Each structure stands twice: as C-alpha cells, then as structure tokens.
Image (tube, helix red, strand yellow):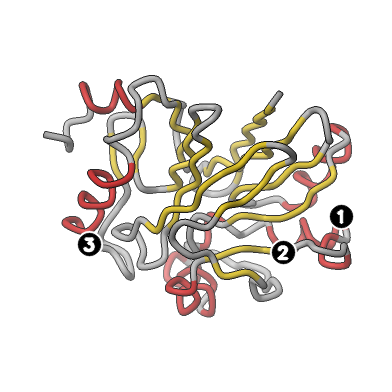
Amino acid sequence: MLEIEKIVLGPVATNTYIVGDQESKQAVVIDPAWDGAVLAEKIRQLGWGIQSVWLTHAHFDHFGGLADLLTGLELSEHEGFFVGLHPKDMNLWRIKGGAIMFGVPMKSAPKPTHEFREGDLLSVGKYEFQVHHTPGHSSGHVIFHCESEGILFSGDLIFKQGIGRTDLLGGSFSTLMESIQKYVLPLPDETRIYSGHGPETTVGEERRLNPFIK
C-alpha cells in the first residue's frame, strides 16, 4: 500500500508530502517546505527510511526545511540517497528561491545531486512515478505521476480551483496553461491531485470547476 502523509509547513502554508511504500518502509519527501527538524521527527515516528527528496521546483517555500531535514536524519550520508531538482531551476536555487525578496531568512542547504528530466522514472518501493517537466510557475517546475495508483503530485502547477502564480521569476501564464493542458487534463477524471498548497482535488473536478480551464 502506498501511504501519503501531508504536513502543512512554513510562512505560506506549503504542503510537504511523505510518500512511502508500507511493505518496504521506503519513502521519499516531496518539497520539504519548512521546519526540517519537525519533519525529521515525524519521519522517525512513522519509521520510514527516506531514499530521496524530490523538489517540484526551487521557490524558497518548497525547500526551506531541507537543510535541517538532512541534518536531522543524516540523509546525505546514506548510500544512494539524492535530492532531485530540474536543472532549469538551479539559478533559482542559487538565490535561495527568492527568499530575500520576501524578507524571509533561510538556511543554506547542499546543492541537489540529481537532475530531473522529462520522462524520468522514479521508485518508491514497488511504486513507480514518472517525472514531467511542467514550466510556467518556474522554468524548471516538475510534477510526479503514479499511473498505477492514480496519483499526481502537482507542486504549484495546479490547485483546487486555481493555478500557480506566474508573476515570479521564470513564470509564464501561457506556458503554465500549456503544461496543464499537456500533462494534467489528459489524465483520468479520478486521478487525485496533491498540490503544493491547499486541499486535495481530482483531475475531473478541475476540468469541471477550475475557472482557468476552458
């Protein structure tokens, strides 16, 4: 069974996800938004072995807890462990995701060691996720789709009856809408969307009710 634990963290209420395979007890963290020590303690309580950290993009509120998470679980020392980010968001990473623009202090974290590419396949225990490059909110934004379970981690591409901001560095409204049309709307209606902010939704619900989708 694939287990999903959502924790809302940080100054803009970002969703961090711990996604694990109950059988193998292997898990990943998607977007360690803030309070890395809190995340580390939660992971210890759940008994997960964290094999990697997946970043949907490099805005500060999606990796603000990474430094303390790595320290708290000594993750960088584990063989095979990686932090993944699309290379087109590395410039955003280097300026700490724009944190200074919002007056938010943020710890430095080690540079991501894995470059996500369109079509990459990632594993969480026996479950397989495909990476799709979905620019528009940022240049290197990606999403993670598990077809077998009907699950999509959408980052800040699409929300429940909303879409990601396009007025930040690397943003483009037309590009974001193209990404949604290409990689979200073709999915089955029952596909569950776990986004970077706000509640869970489905592809069918967004197709019907999202005011940005025509």
- Asked where in the image residue 185 lies, by quadrant, the reply is top left
Which dot marks residue 185? none
The answer to whether mark 2 and mark 3 are in CB contact below 8 A is no
Q: Is 16 above or below relative to 116?
A: above
Cα distance in 3D space between marks 1 and 2? 13 Å
In depth, the one of 72 and 192 nearer the eye is: 192
Q: Give me the residue at 53% from left, 37% from top.
A: 146
Residue topped by disc 2: 82
**Foreground: disc 2 or disc 3:** 2
Residue topped by disc 1: 73
Which x, y percent locates residue 51?
A: 77, 52
Cα distance in 3D space between marks 2 and 3? 29 Å
Q: Total label count?
A: 3
Residue topped by disc 3: 172
Which x, y percent locates residue 85?
A: 55, 65
**Amino acid tagged 2:** Phe
Q: Residues within 10 Å of mark 3 (few under 14, many from 20)?
A: some
What quarter of the picture does the N terminus occupy?
top right
Residue 195 located left or right of residue 172:
right
Residue 77 located left or right of residue 18:
right
**Amino acid tagged 1:** Leu
The answer to whether mark 1 and mark 2 are in CB contact below 8 A is no
